[in-house]
Structures are given as structure tokens and as C-alpha cells.
């Protein structure tokens, strides 16, 4: 009996009839899935064929073609990447961390989180009368390789500025969806071991430049005994930050425990040098085309 053929004026009876029809359809669907699962267990080729014929269409799979995806960049064409020292293991990163002027409590709380996440970091409270370029010059004299500035507005952390020393470039990221460590369900306690770094889905030339930035602020000799890993996953130009501890249960299974925190970054601007000429900037009209991604 089809739904459009039912004309029952009594509301209670009508709901009861539709509930029985819906329950019958659910039983038929579960029976079909159970039968199909048994057939696929006996013949794995059927499952492979079904998955190959039913590939879901997503925005990621429909993204516009970018000629820089997977392309090798020559040294003389790599204007921004040449500034990074991520391949120099003899010069580990040394990070200077500060905030914007007149920062509130939330900025200092977030600074405490970054002190645990970033290795070899020094935090200095921002004072009035010092511009970022003046602070950068003092950092260069003290052999700092990077400077990170926490941007806070209206008692909320809104962004992060990364300045690679001594010659730049400068990156500004918008920060959102911040979840504190204590609010992460089942979180563990992080240790002082240097974590491993996973960069996922940075495909374009711009994305590789951003990935090189994150490579430059983490040492390339992680402490594997700590079993800690930091993941920066790029999806649709949003960079998701996660931190986990892993454990090998057996030869095939691995357990994960999230350590926190969680937050999302979105690249807004890249400048040459220390906040000089703008190399790339995100504009509102870029969001009109939902299938074009830049990282």
C-alpha cells in the first residue's frame, strides 16, 4: 500500500498505519543489507565492484583543476620556500611567542597552550611602545628563527601571525572553533616529548608553502618514545589542528588518545619579508566559487 493511497481521517490511526509501513520498509532494507553482506563475505569481488560503481560525489572531488597540484617547483622559482630552514637539522627552531597590545586573559591562556604545543618556545608579555618590526629585530639578534603573535579581540582569540626570521615571509591565519584541553572528551595528558608532525592534503604551490611554514617550527628529530603526533589536516582551505598519543595494540591495530586542544586555521594573508609587500590575500569574492580551493 503506497503512502499516497492512504486516506485516513483519524489522526491516531493514520500515524499507526504509517508507523507500520515505515517499520516494514526498515525490515526489508536490513534484510537486503544482511543478504548482501553474506554474499560479499563469500565473494570479496562483489564488494569491490559495488564500491567502484557507487563513488559518492563530494565538493572535494569536484574541485577545479589547479596546475600547481603535484608540480615540482624549481629552486629559482621558489621565491617563498627558499627562506625556510626546515632542511637544516643543525639549526633547530627557536620560537618567540607574544600577543597583541593590551591583550586580555584569554590570550595568555592560549599562550600557555601554545607553550606546551610548540617546542623550544619563549613567551614574553607584549609592552606598549614596541612595534612588531622592532620586536623582530630584537629576536633576530637573539637568534630566534620564528615569531608567533596571538591576536585577540573582544576577549576572544581571533588569529595567529607567524613571522619567519630574519627575512620573512609573514603569515596571518584566522583562528576559530577553539576547544580547550579540558573540554576534549577523554583527553590525555601531554608530555614534553617532541611530537611527530603530519601534514595532510597541502597540494598546491601555495599549500606547500604553508606546509613548509609548519615544518620550520617543529624539529625534524621527534621523540618516538613519547608516541605523540600533531596533525594539520587541510580540507577546503581550512586547516584543522589535532594532537594525539598513539599505542600499538598489535601488529594491525593502533589506539589513539586525543590530547587537545582543537582549533581551526584559515589562511588570510601572506606578506614578503616582515609584514611588507602582500604576496597573497584572501578576499570575500573568493568564497563565491565553492569548488575552487587554494591550498
Image (cartoon, grey):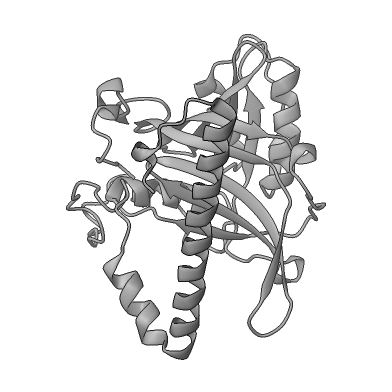
Q: Quadrant of residue 279?
A: top left
Nearer the observer, 158 or 84: 158
Nearer the observer, 42 or 263: 42
In this view, which residue lies farthest toward the bottom? 42
Work out which quarter of the rendered image holds the C terminus and state it: top left
Asked if one can make out residue 125 in the rendered structure from this viewpoint, the answer is no
Residue 200, x across and y down, in percent: 45, 57
Is 265 on the left or on the right of 68, as rendered? right
Q: Quadrant of residue 155?
A: top right
Residue 70, x across and y down, in percent: 26, 61
132 lies above or below 211? above
Residue 205, x across and y down, in percent: 28, 50
Q: Residue at x 33, y 54 (%)?
A: 203
Q: Residue at x 29, y 41 (%)?
A: 293
Is 188 on the left or on the right of 124, as rendered? right
Is 141 on the left or on the right of 108, as rendered? left
Nearer the observer, 292 or 172: 292
38 lies above or below 290? below
216 lies above or below 170? below
Asked if one can make out residue 19 in the rendered structure from this viewpoint, the answer is yes
42 lies above or below 172? below
Q: Residue at x 41, y 89 (%)?
A: 43
Amino acid at each position: 500500500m503506497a503512502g499516497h493511497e492512504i486516506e485516513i481521517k483519524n489522526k491516531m490511526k493514520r500515524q499507526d498505519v504509517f508507523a507500520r509501513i515505515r517499520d516494514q520498509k526498515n525490515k526489508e532494507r536490513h534484510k537486503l543489507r544482511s543478504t548482501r553482506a553474506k554474499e560479499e563475505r563469500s565473494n570479496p569481488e562483489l564488494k569491490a565492484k559495488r564500491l567502484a560503481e557507487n563513488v559518492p560525489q563530494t565538493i572535494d572531488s569536484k574541485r577545479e583543476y589547479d596546475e600547481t597540484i603535484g608540480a615540482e617547483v624549481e629552486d629559482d622559482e621558489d621565491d617563498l620556500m627558499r627562506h625556510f630552514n626546515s632542511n637544516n637539522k643543525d639549526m633547530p627552531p627557536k620560537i618567540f611567542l607574544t600577543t597583541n597590545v593590551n591583550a586580555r586573559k584569554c590570550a595568555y591562556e592560549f599562550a600557555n597552550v601554545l607553550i606546551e604545543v610548540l617546542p623550544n618556545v619563549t613567551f614574553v608579555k607584549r609592552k606598549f611602545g614596541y612595534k612588531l618590526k622592532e620586536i623582530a629585530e630584537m629576536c633576530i639578534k637573539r637568534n630566534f628563527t620564528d615569531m608567533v603573535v596571538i591576536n585577540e579581540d573582544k576577549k576572544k582569540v581571533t588569529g595567529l601571525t607567524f613571522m619567519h626570521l630574519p627575512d620573512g615571509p609573514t603569515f596571518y591565519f584566522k583562528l576559530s572553533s577553539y576547544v580547550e584541553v579540558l573540554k576534549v572528551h577523554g583527553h590525555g595528558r601531554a608530555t614534553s616529548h617532541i611530537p611527530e608532525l603530519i601534514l595532510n592534503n597541502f597540494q598546491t604551490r601555495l599549500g606547500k608553502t604553508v606546509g613548509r611554514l609548519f615544518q620550520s617550527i617543529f624539529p625534524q628529530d621527534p621523540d618516538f618514545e613519547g608516541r605523540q603526533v600533531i596533525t594539520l589536516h587541510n580540507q577546503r582551505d581550512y586547516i584543522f589542528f589535532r594532537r594525539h598519543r598513539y599505542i600499538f595494540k598489535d601488529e594491525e591495530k593502533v589506539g589513539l588518545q586525543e590530547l587537545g586542544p582543537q582549533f581551526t586555521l584559515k589562511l588570510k594573508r601572506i606578506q614578503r619579508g616582515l609584514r611588507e609587500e602582500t604576496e597573497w590575500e584572501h578576499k570575500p569574492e573568493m568564497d563565491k566559487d565553492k569548488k575552487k580551493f587554494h591550498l
